Amino acid sequence: MKVGVLGGGQLGRMLALAGYPLGMNFRFLDSSPEAPAEPLAEFIDGSFHDDEVLARFAGDLDVVTYEFENVPVTAARQLAQRAPVYPPPEALDVAQDRLSEKTLFRRLEIPTPRFAAIDSKEDLHAAVNDIGLPAVLKTRRLGYDGKGQRVLRSPADVDAAWTALSGAPLILEQFIAFDRELSVLAVRGRDGDVRFYPLSQNSHAGGILRVTLAPAPNVESALEQQADRHARAVLETLGYVGVLAIEFFEKDGVLLANEMAPRVHNSGHWTIEGAQTSQFENHLRAVCSLPLGDATALGRFAMFNIIGETPPIPAILKIRGVHLHLYGKQARAGRKLGHVNVRLEEGAASQEQLDAVGRLTGVMTTLA
Ligand code: AMP
């Protein structure tokens, strides 16, 4: 089975690492020759917008998938004429635009923060009146890791936020003083079989994911059921194949959907050692029409992102229960360079593990 992957970042690298034991081969397409997947597989350094490059990429592939959600939908549709493309380009289309994403959630009766499309300063003032403050103004497209957004706390912030972001289509969202952030990962096979990973609890700083605890502590089954129901609705409506992630805000026992990612997701990295079948393997099983694997957690895990600089490797590996995953990227401020998965022990020992990894990665966390 030869799998073509659009995008050659760390998610692609981890897909390849999961696929080789299953006898799969990979070809990546990315415009950066230094992409993390480059050393691992056949690699085409080229543009998603170049027809000749796309034809060369498609060659003898059995299936095409993506690890990067800003792949142009036109490229995905073009490739779909040569090989099956999963998840369906329609999912990519919806997920690339915060307004279409939230409109889909609303249509499927998945609760979201209140929102409004903003195309002019007048729209913004009207939406602020309607939704109230605080609120968050975001670019509809190409925002990630907190980029392209401004929190509006007082009326004085409104015009400044407009000046900073106008020029691109925008969305205004109600600001949710959430109890916590949770995400669900679900996978659907080509035969319609669906598996759900347990909810993950995510902590962000500066819009970037820092730590995931999984399974999320103190989750009642009713909450897990909400997440699974919402994920199933999206999967089935889009005829989805592969792993889908939905990020939620939990507020007073209700999940409000913030966004979805039509790909494997950072909040699922704990599944590499923490679940019976990792998100990467299950994504490949799904797109290659193989039976899905069990998505059950094997214990309690924490995942810490390594951002900006890599701590001394021996110091990380000395901590009980850790697994280190480095992506082979040059260090740069704010860049995700790798992650540490930790299998948590019982009782007070787990806090010692969290503290030890937290001191090295710069993020302290508790299980409370
Ligand atoms: P996003 O790019 O939409 O994932 O936003 C990045 C982070 O900003 C989220 O994970 C939240 O921590 C925060 N955030 C985004 N939208 C909202 C909102 N409507 N209310 C409160 N916090 C938000």
Image (spheres, rainbow, N blue to C red):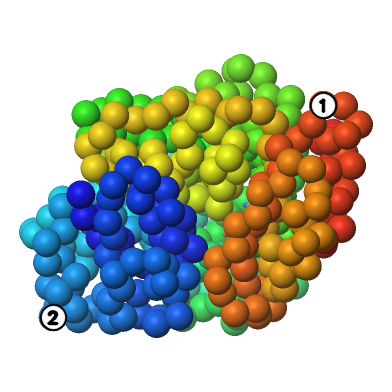
Question: Is residue 321 placed above or below 219 in the rendered structure?
Answer: below
Q: Residues within 10 Å of mark 1 (few under 14, many from 20)?
A: few
- Closer-to-camera residue (103/295): 295
Which residue occupies the foreground of this view, 225 or 263? 263
Asked whether the beta carbons under mark 1 and mark 2 sit within 8 Å of each other, the answer is no
Question: In x, y percent, where is residue 322?
Answer: 71, 46
Residue 56, percent from left and from top: 14, 74
Identify the residue under disc 2: 52
Q: Position of residue 301 (x, y in %)?
A: 69, 37
Q: Residue at x 21, y 29 (%)?
A: 191
From the viewer's perspective, is 134 left or right of 31? right
Looking at the picture, which amino acid does disc 1 mark?
Answer: Glu
Look at the numbered disc 2 and give the secondary structure of its residue: helix
Kind of residue at badge 2: Glu
> Which residue is drawn at the image coordinates 72% and 73% (left, top)?
309
Specify whether residue 341 is in view: yes
Q: Secondary structure at mark 1?
A: loop
- Residue under label 1: 346
Q: Does label 1 point to a residue whose CB lies under 8 Å from ligand 1? A: no
Q: Quadrant of residue 93?
A: bottom left
Quarter of the image for the C terminus: give it. Answer: top right
Name the mark on residue 6. Answer: none
Q: Nearer the viewer, mark 1 or mark 2?
A: 1
User: Regarding ligand 1, which quadrant of the image does it lie in?
Assistant: bottom right
216 sits left or right of 229 in the view: right
Label 2: few (<14), some or many (≥20) within 10 Å? few
The tag earlier along the polypeptide, 1 or 2, is 2
From this view, report whether residue 167 is shown above or below residue 320: below
Residue drawn at the location 33% of the way across and 34% of the way down = 188
Q: CA distance from mark 1 to mark 2?
A: 55 Å
Residue sitting at the far left: 81
Residue drawn 50% across the image and 50% down it: 265
